[in-house]
Image (tube, helix red, strand yellow):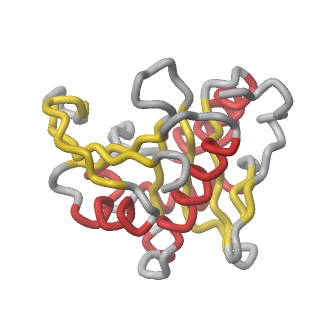
């Protein structure tokens, strides 16, 4: 990928309905409320218990440093001016290419926002020279697998014991990929 001409600290991706933008301090409360959701806690390796300080660190430190150090393009997902979730592209030297991830706040589910955001970020990475983009969804997370398919990713197989869980165990994931032209 060629990110030399991209200022990741300000990069914003737009779709028909969404703005995928840098996090702002005022997003911390919505992140905190969303991450109290049992489904988000089930599938993400969040601190337990999840606190408002954790949300503030994610918004003000983690996402900012990931962008500044060109490790990831982590975005707040906004629809009609409201925070509805999080989506990102994580850059690595992996043979699988950059990895796309996402979560939606409980108040925003069922509208296709996750698939729209995932597709937009995959398209963005491919436009910037990624030879492929991948996405991992827990084998038990049927909703996330459906999002991946709607975002144009093809199922490629199961990667065993690759997902770390909060309790120290590891789980299997379905691997999805997108190539230029998909």
**Relative side of 91 to 4, left or right:** left
- Residue sitting at 70 percent across and 31 percent down? 67
Residue 170: percent from the left, percent from the top? 16, 31
Q: Looking at this view, is 175 or 87 the one in front?
A: 175
Where, by quadrant of the figure, is residue 83 drawn? bottom right
Q: Residue furthest front?
A: 181
How many callouts does the rendering have? 0
**Relative side of 123 to 68, left or right:** left
Q: Pick the quarter of the image with the N terminus.
A: top right
- Residue sitting at 50 percent across and 18 percent down? 93
Q: Looking at this view, is 66 or 162 the one in front?
A: 162
Q: Looking at this view, is 49 or 3 the one in front?
A: 3
Q: Is residue 181 above or below residue 151?
A: above
Q: Is residue 116 above or below residue 73?
A: below
**Relative side of 41 to 61, left or right:** left
Residue 164: percent from the left, percent from the top? 25, 31
- Residue sitting at 65 percent across and 54 percent down? 76
Q: Is residue 72 above or below residue 89?
A: above
Residue 26: percent from the left, percent from the top? 74, 55
Residue 118: percent from the left, percent from the top? 52, 57
- Residue sitting at 17 percent across and 41 percent down? 158
């Amino acid at each position: 990928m060629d990110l030399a001409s991209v200022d990741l600290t300000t990069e914003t991706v737009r779709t028909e309905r969404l703005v995928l933008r840098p996090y702002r301090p005022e997003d911390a409360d919505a992140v905190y409320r969303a991450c109290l959701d049992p489904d988000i806690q089930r599938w993400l390796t969040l601190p337990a218990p999840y606190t408002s300080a954790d949300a503030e660190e994610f918004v003000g430190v983690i996402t900012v440093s990931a962008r500044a150090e060109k490790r990831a393009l982590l975005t707040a997902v906004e629809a009609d001016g409201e925070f509805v979730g999080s989506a990102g592209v994580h850059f690595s030297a992996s043979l699988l290419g950059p990895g796309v991830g996402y979560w939606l706040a409980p108040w925003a589910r069922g509208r296709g926002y996750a698939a729209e955001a995932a597709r937009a970020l995959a398209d963005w990475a491919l436009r910037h020279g990624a030879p492929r983009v991948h996405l991992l969804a827990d084998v038990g997370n049927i909703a996330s697998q459906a999002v991946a398919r709607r975002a144009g990713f093809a199922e490629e197989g199961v990667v065993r014991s690759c997902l770390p869980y909060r309790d120290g165990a590891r789980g299997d994931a379905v691997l999805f990929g997108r190539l230029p032209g998909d």
